[in-house]
Image (cartoon, rainbow, N blue to C red):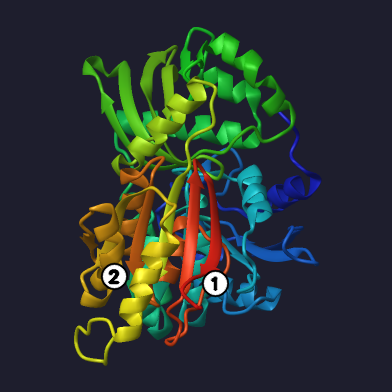
Amino acid sequence: MVRALPVWVVLCLLTTLAEAAPQDAPGAAQSPAALPAPIAFKVATSRRKEALPYVVQLPAGFAADRAFPLLVLVPDGDSEAAARAAIDAVGRVVAEAGFVVVSPALAATDATLPELFAQLRQTYRIDQGAMHAAGGGKAAPDAIRLVQRNSHEFQTLTLWGATAAAEDTTAVLRLHERRVRVLATPTASALRDHFAALHAERAEKGVAADVALTLDDFHDAAAKGDEDRYFAILPDDAVFLGTDPTERWTGAHFRKFAMPWFERGPAWTYVPLRRAITVGPGGAIAWFDETLDNNAYGECRGTGVLALRGGRWVLQQYNLTVPVPNDLMRSVAERIRAFAAGRAPTATTIVVVRHAEKAGSGDDPGLSEAGVVRAVRLAETLAGLDVAAVYATEWKRTVETAGPLCQSRRLQPQIVPAADTAALAARLRRDNPGRAAVVVGHSNTVPSLLEAFGMKGKVEIAETEYDRLFVVSIAGDDVRVIPLRYGTN
């Protein structure tokens, strides 16, 4: 079932095709004179009172049925004029390398832009499936936020200029399979060459390129709700294995199952970020594995086999799974067992406290007299909790704070690095499914640990506050944090 494009899209394409030069392959530099004029659009979003303007620069030879790399170029400002300026300064030159360049009038306050990305995926076939993002100068921070908040849409982020060099890209670098590049002060032509080379890093060659194009077409058809194109690639005799253990379908059965999703328009969107393809002897069969991102399920893995049939590649099997990090496997396994047994998963309880009052301000001070009293109060406060493990940082004041609690439970404190709260949060989940544990940290590490657990809202602990206590309850994906105080009387 193929649906008609919206009228505004058809008019855009007709205008573009009338102005376009003869078709060239993406990545081949074009003369600026051959480019069509930029076109302005708007999309209604849930985060803005007014529709979001964006400007599109199409490459020479653009055709709606061909895949082109797509770059989201963040402008320095939240107006259509700023978006046009970004297109004029950088976008038109990058389009010479065969890119569709989109510049949204993006404000720093825009938390998410799902409607924009959905419209782009309905309008264009995106080569390699995932988009590229970029921002230079004052636009660099907004470009970082754009990728952080919409990470499932992007495979790369490029920043440039002094502002970009000063920005912290750590959060984006933590995203699996994303490539981040920070440039000095490149010219527009240098950026054109940069994006062409960046996109080429993931390009397949020879027969593998045809296989990759088929897989991209498969995912694009689902994102557009094109049922006929999707199931032409997944024929009736193919096998589809879903994420649920009960989901093993033939292509014919899967088509019946998926009909309601395709009838509503876009069915589902899985964005490929990495792919490995092996072509068998004779070039008539190929197998692959790919890393995908999905807004609801997060990072997924697709594996399968394709065969050359009637001169075109079709899937014989597609297996969609959700890889589980080793650090989370025990808690996930426990939740699956609980689900299979028809019972609620056992909650994990993590008590997070700051160390008690310290004596002096040396390199590694211990507890003051007041701190020793508070440490005893902590053990008394948690007397009714069946604590299985206690964690403290490498500093004397946290170990001493945990001392009375450990003595009362005959436990040894497990020493953990103060700085790496993300790793600590993962370890606490992994090692304590269904148990209770206590962590003694610092005024700056307690808030970041709570954030790593998924707490909403900012926590600030003053230098003079030693009585803050947080109870974190984790049951599967449900995380609740209860802030308390102790030892104040």
Q: Amino acid at mark 2?
A: Ala
- Badge 2 is on which residue? 419
**Residue 392: image x %, image y %?**
27, 65
Residue nearest the viewer, comparing 341 with 98: 341
Residue nearest the viewer, comparing 134 with 7: 134
Outermost residue, top side: 237
**Residue at point 46% right, 74% down?**
487
Tell me the quarter of the image containing the N terminus. Answer: top right
**Residue 451: image x %, image y %?**
47, 63
Residue nearest the viewer, comparing 202 with 18: 202
- Badge 1 is on which residue? 458
Q: Is residue 387 left or right of residue 56?
A: left
**Residue 247: image x %, image y %?**
51, 17
Q: Which tag, 2 or 1, sits closer to the chain's start?
A: 2
The answer to whether one can see residue 418 in this image is yes
**Picture quadrant of residue 167:** bottom left
> Is 304 above or below relative to 123?
above
> Is 207 above or below relative to 167?
above
> Is 43 above or below relative to 85?
above
**Residue at point 58% right, 15% down?**
254
Q: Amino acid at mark 1?
A: Lys
Q: Is residue 478 left or right of residue 209?
A: right
**Residue at point 49% right, 21% down?**
340
Q: Name the element at disc 1.
A: loop
